[in-house]
Amino acid sequence: MAMGVTPCLEDFLKQCHLSGDSAYTAIRSLLERLEDPTTRTHARIFLSELHKRFHSKEASESCLRTYHFQIQDIYLEQYEGFQKRRKLTMMVIPSIFMPEDWSFTFYEGINRHPDSIFKDRTVAELGCGNGWISIAIAEKCSPLKVYGLDINPRAVKISWINLYMNALDEKGHPIYDEENKTLLDRVEFHESDLLSYCSDNHIELERIVGCIPQILNPNPDAMSKMVTENASEEFLHSLSNYCALQGFVEDQFGLGLIARAVEEGISVIKPLGIMIFNMGGRPGQAVCRRLFERRGLRVDQLWQTKVLQAADTDISALVEIEKNSPHRFEFFMGLAGDQPICARTAWAYAKAGGRISHALSVYSCQLRQPNQVKEVFEFLKNGFHDISSSLDLSFQDDSVADEKIPFLAYLASVLKMNSFLPYEPPAGSRRFRNLISGFMRTYHHIPLTADNVVVFPSRTVAIESSLRLLSPRLAIVDEQLSRNLPKQWLTSLNVGEIESGKHSVGGVAVIEAPRQSDSMMELIRKLKPEVVVTGMAQFESVTSSAFERLTDITREIGCRLFVDISDHFELSSLPSSNGVLKYLAGNVLPSHVAIVCGLLKNQVYSDLEVAFVISEEETMFKALCKTVELLQGNSSVISQYYYGCLFHELLAFQLADRHSLPERSVEKTRAFEVNGFSSSAISRLDHTELAVNESDEFPVVHMDVNQSFLPITTPVKASMFESFARQNISESETDVTCGIREMISTSYGFSSDSNSEFIYADSTVALFNKLVLCCIQEGGTLCFPTGSNGNYLSAAKFLNAKIANIPTEPEVGYKLTEKTLAGAVKNLNKPWVYISGPTISPTGLLYSNEEINKLLLVCAKFGARVILDTSFSGVEFNSKGFKGWNLAGTLDKLSSVHPNFCTALLGGLFSKMLTGGIKFGYLLINQPALIETFHCFAGLSKPHRTIKYTVKKLLDLKDQRTGDLLNSTYELTEFLAGRYKQLKQRLEACGWEVLEAQAGVSIIAKPLTLLGKTIKIKKGESTYEFKLDDSNLREAMLRATGLCINSASWTGIPGYCCFMMALDDSDFERSLECISNFKSLVC
């Protein structure tokens, strides 16, 4: 039929009579003439004649049976308006969804909204069928644009015909509305799998309406066919009745397609947009509502009724779901039935000739925190779809939602934008400390900076660490704060012991006092302690009077004062103040006073804690920074992210510097010298190689940090996010013990029994330091091989442990040997031996199974306790011939050699799975006496349940021995092998002698050609000159190039410095440049 010729009515019907496909071909030709402006009028007149030919209901139905199409009038609700019509004239064909109760109810639900919600809005209809709802919305509500979308290409073509049929009158003239627009200006139809058309064309929507299938196809293979215009009528029609599995948890209820539509809608809808969906009540109203609510949407039920189940829809898939799950669907016998029946009963009743019905509801939903929820789903759609089933953003309490959703959005943005968690100073993230000080300035008018704030894992850790730093002869501690201090500190003392200066075991004597200022001050006057730690009673916290009296009396006797404000500190936009903060708003914090605050008051996690200490004395601030680094490593980054997000939400809407802060009074003149730090403590801190301060103008490349800055693998990111996205996590889902037990048994042949205990902490550093305290408690000597991790050695010195050095030889790569170990421990009483392995940190060598078994035999012979540190192991990249450890047989035999011998296994997941910023440490002790001693030292910062959930997920993935985690770990191991070769080559080219490494993330090297030479460095107005040796090489390289490494004083091996190589690409390239530049500057 020629393009420009209007067909003869009889010829048209003759072609349609042949088959459904022939009818569609004829109709498609008619659409082509409607699309051409030169033939549009005649084509529309032809449609009018066609409609008149089959105008009655009987004739229309006969036309469908005979000619495979039907033109029918759809009567809309009565309403008034300029040129508004009460009916639409619509064509349908058998291969598309035909208007019925399902879609009529949906339209009635849409009408529950006022017309204004669509006025001048951009709207999309999903599953538009023949387009009648899209056209009706455009006709009634004057939207800016309606996009009718359907996956069925024939539905789209028929929708365009219907659009022309209603945009033009019977004579082919345009019908204009009050804005002088036609329906052609307001409506478009496009073939689209849900919202893919809008997403692909970057169309932002303000309204989304959808009436799409909600029953799984009983023939799943049918849904895998390609959707094309030439597909069979049966297949194309099935698209309107059935949906395929979509990979969502809602698939089990037949709602997977709706779930995908909602998630796609979240990505394209504007923040204040509204989505309206038709939902069959078969799964139950609670299931339907939860589909929306767990995705962060507020839901309103606009309309509910009952409709008869379509006779051509097979519900056997729902019967199968009931067979395999406890869920029961809801059907009714006829429209009058009021007692629900399950799918199986409904199926049987229908087979016997009965009519079944189900509830039908129209839901309107809107994002509760749109920008944040959109950020979450933007993260999920980029490779993290599996987490969607675990996501739960439904909250009964808005305050919980207001806290958790912004954090999830922030975490999503961090994981999306960063391939790794960046370096954070041990004293706390700079961002987090700035947020704390900003909150103090904004809400309490206290002009603090980040350099007045030190972050600790918990309040208990902050207090214990401060006491260990100051090592007072006597401390008085509020009885509510002393509960988790070491038991040895809390032993009773008589006045004679105090006056004579005797210390309790562990170095600190603690007297408990009531939390009441009068009683506390009386004890201070009588006992004259060197440190006081106290909170404020509720009735005394309102004013600053009690705080000022405590400040004065402690100043008079030269005593340090730590005041805990945790119970009175509120994270709120209207925080109540307290006496301490009121005082600080008008006065500089006295130099002998520090403020302690534990953050535990959040709406979601009762056990998620981080703490901070405020000091305006620079010496105390720096000493606390060093102390937390030595004793804890650093505080949980995730906890800092969480509370940082809360602070940010309270500060984000505030105008900066709106009020000038008042001048504050300085402290009174001191009557007595305040208790300072012991000379030994100062010496230990000054001679410890710790983190360096960096500025924004001169960023530092950190090759001195035991942390991986390599890309965090997708399974790790997924597990981290899922741990917070979930709600109501069960105890079994956070129980990591079975997984850890299996891992150490498989990796090391290390078994555990009923006498063993697993202990977990935020970091291996904290666990190691508790073992050091156990050694001190038992009167033991801690033996370190030359070439051990410098952080551990420095921590042991800080804790005043008795230390012995075990010499190692270069000929064996500075490993321990039987001979050197036996020579070191044979004359020691109660030796404790530290062994890093299989990977030795920092040398990167490996102890073979034979070597470690021989070393353990020596330890057993002399009754040594062994700290076997595996926390740097798991990444072997140059380990040909290394077959791992199998210690089971050896340890069983050695257990009876000496009663004191035991092995404490220390480990983490950092190297095993390259977990980036996740901090998690475990300790396995297999001797009851040592377990009892260990528990004398309370105050261990335990990993939060979200961390344990993450760890368990990763352990379960590791046990599968296949999949993304194993592949990613293997790839990163291979990547490290390449890194090692690059770094080794560059160092050797620049005059360094590199010790061959086999594993781990660090290597050591000696600057043979650089030592003894002089380098001059000019920085601004200052010039620095160094004659290079072990004591100044680190500082010289840092000042000259910005590269920070660990020097020989840290490695313990004369001349050898340590380089951590698990950097991100840009920092690693910069580090190589720094090494070359340093050589050129020296030469």
Image (cartoon, rainbow, N blue to C red):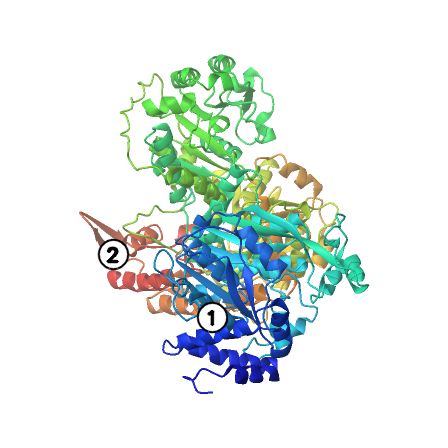
Which label sits in the foreground, 2 or 1?
1
* Image quadrant in which the C terminus is located: bottom left
Q: Residue at x 53, y 49 (%)?
A: 365
Mark number, residue 591: none
Total numbered circles: 2
**Front residue of 701 and 775:** 701
Q: Residue at x 32, y 51 (%)?
A: 1035
Residue 410 shows in the view: no
**Front residue of 824 and 1031:** 1031
Picture coordinates of residue 1061 (x, y %)? 43, 61
Residue type, label 2: Thr
Q: Residues within 10 Å of mark 1 (few under 14, many from 20)?
A: many
Q: Secondary structure at mark 1?
A: helix
**Front residue of 690 and 310:** 310
Picture coordinates of residue 285 (x, y %)? 65, 49
Q: Residue at x 40, y 69 (%)?
A: 982
Picture coordinates of residue 294 (x, y %)? 57, 49
Picture coordinates of residue 655 (x, y %)? 31, 37
**Front residue of 991 and 705:** 705
Residue labelled with disc 2: 1014
Residue labelled with disc 1: 160
**Residue 761 image-quadrant placement:** top right
**Residue 494 image-quadrant placement:** top right
Q: Residues within 10 Å of mark 2 (few under 14, many from 20)?
A: some
Q: Is residue 56 left or right of residue 586?
A: right
Residue type, label 1: Trp
